[in-house]
Image (cartoon, rainbow, N blue to C red):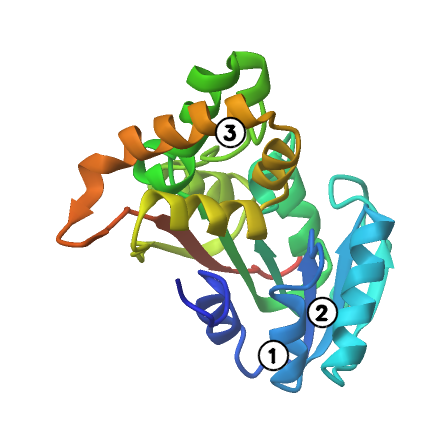
């Protein structure tokens, strides 16, 4: 497993390189926000979850990074003036928006004409068996109701669909690409440990298991991931979609 930045962070940071004022929508605990600020941008992170913002502040302080955190819903009118930013980013938040085009249109409002919007979402679940197969294993071993989480995973998961949403928002010079970066755990057990230590959905599942349930789930995860065996370890596909676009002139 990589100890570097989460997938897509480096690409999104590069997409807004040179932009002085950056808004990070749905910032969560700052996996993208902090690297943006560390590169010298004046960064505002926006999220509706105050606990996430508290963790963002703690992590930023620990890394001696200065940024601004705003509690607000990215699906509501944003509390910023027109053209207040040079760029806006969104990593893994657009896929949960009820009306992604409207969310992007409002983000474009607060970015100056000619500014950049850069978005990343997971590709379709079928292109991400690192996540989808363990979730399916939960459904088999524990019942479908226990696997009814992260339903937005893979939404907007085709490149054309994601590009079309940006175009529907009135953005210009829309360009998308697929970022592929397979995971290479040594075993199914190692992969499950990675999921439960880094993703809250899987951590909560793991914490709720009886010994018999844990054994059944471990066996099902191992069975489902065996098809990705490559020598002594596993190579499990992982794919993210990244789109960059420009804000057109007002009016």
Q: Residue furthest left?
A: 231
Name the residue: 79% across, 81% down. 66
Q: Evaluate if marks 2 and 1 touch, with contact meaning CB atoms under 8 Å apart.
A: yes
Which sits earlier in the primary sequence, circle 2 or circle 1? 1
Q: Nearer the viewer, residue 166 or 55?
A: 55
Q: Position of residue 188 (x, y in %)?
A: 34, 43
Give the numbered dot on residue 19: 1
* Disc 1 secondary structure class: loop
- The residue carrying pointer 3 sits among few (fewer than 14), some (14 to 19) or many (20 or more) residues within 10 Å by Cα, namely some
Residue 72 shown left or right of residue 36 in the figure? right
Write down the residue under mark 3.
Answer: 214
Work out whether residue 13 or residue 52 is closer to the camera in this orientation and state it: 52
Q: Is residue 78 above or below residue 59?
A: above
Name the image quarter holding the N terminus: bottom left
Q: Left or right: 180 with respect to 98? A: left
Q: Which residue is mark 2?
A: 85
């Amino acid at each position: 497993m990589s100890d570097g930045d989460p997938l897509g962070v480096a690409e999104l940071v590069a997409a807004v390189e040179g932009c002085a004022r950056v808004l990070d929508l749905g910032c969560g605990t700052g996996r993208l926000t902090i690297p943006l600020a560390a590169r010298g941008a004046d960064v505002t992170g926006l999220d509706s979850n105050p606990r996430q913002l508290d963790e963002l502040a703690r992590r930023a302080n620990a890394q001696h990074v200065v940024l601004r955190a705003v509690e607000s819903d990215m699906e509501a009118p944003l509390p910023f003036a027109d053209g207040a930013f040079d760029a806006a980013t969104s990593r893994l938040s657009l896929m949960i928006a009820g009306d992604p085009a409207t969310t992007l249109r409002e983000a474009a409002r607060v970015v100056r004409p000619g500014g950049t919007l850069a978005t990343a979402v997971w590709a379709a679940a079928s292109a991400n068996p690192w996540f989808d197969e363990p979730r399916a294993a939960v459904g088999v071993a524990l019942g479908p109701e226990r696997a009814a989480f992260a339903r937005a995973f893979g939404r907007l998961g085709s490149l054309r669909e994601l590009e079309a949403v940006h175009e529907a928002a009135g953005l210009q010079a829309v360009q998308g690409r697929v970022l592929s970066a397979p995971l290479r755990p040594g075993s199914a057990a190692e992969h499950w440990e990675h999921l439960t230590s880094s993703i809250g959905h899987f951590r909560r599942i793991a914490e709720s298991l009886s010994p018999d349930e844990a054994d059944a789930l471990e066996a099902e995860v191992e069975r489902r991931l065996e098809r990705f065996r490559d020598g002594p370890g596993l190579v499990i596909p992982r794919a993210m979609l990244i789109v960059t676009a420009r804000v057109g002139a007002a009016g």
